[in-house]
Image: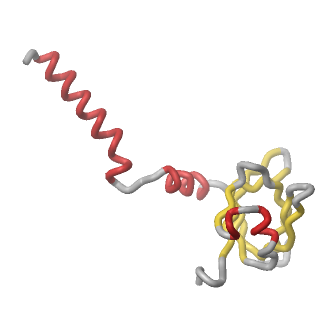
Amino acid sequence: MTKTTRVLLTLSLTLVLVSFTPFALGDDPKTQSQTDTQQEPSVMGDLKSVDADTKTLVVTTSDGTDMQFAYNETTEIVGAQGTIEGLSANAGSKVKVFYKEEDGKKTATRIKVKDAKTDS
């Protein structure tokens, strides 16, 4: 083998190994999504209401402040069957809302419902 061929073969093998590293370490896109989400601001509180017509929800924080968030088709819902309908049925439940704020409007990117039956 020529030196150039060995170098190219070594580089190719290294590239293949590096591309499979996330799978070997157990990383998955969902974990990456959670890491990205952790960098966003979030608020915890009780789900007060969900308005499907205006696509908004209200969360009451521990200090009694009501915070309103918009949601859209890209908002991820964890728990509550993963749907807005399921979320609506869980009024009063503890939730954690990750959001982005633009022009003074808070838009939920992820809503995690704490299910009293499975979470402690």
Residue drawn at 71 percent across, 49 percent down: 74
- Residue 100 x, y percent position in the rendering: 73, 51
Residue drawn at 19 percent across, 25 percent down: 9
Q: Is 46 left or right of 120, judged from the image as shown? A: right
Q: Is 77 left or right of 14, judged from the image as shown? A: right
Q: Is residue 50 visible?
A: yes
Q: How is the image coloured?
A: secondary structure
Q: Is residue 41 visible?
A: no
Q: Quadrant of residue 39?
A: bottom right
Asked if 10 appears above or below 47 in the picture, the reply is above
- Residue 101 x, y percent position in the rendering: 77, 50
- Residue 98 x, y percent position in the rendering: 69, 59
Q: Quadrant of the C terminus?
A: bottom right
- Residue 105 x, y percent position in the rendering: 84, 51
Viewer-proximal residue among 81 and 120 = 81
Q: Quadrant of residue 55?
A: bottom right
Asked if 106 appears above or below 13 in the picture, the reply is below
Q: Quadrant of residue 35?
A: bottom right
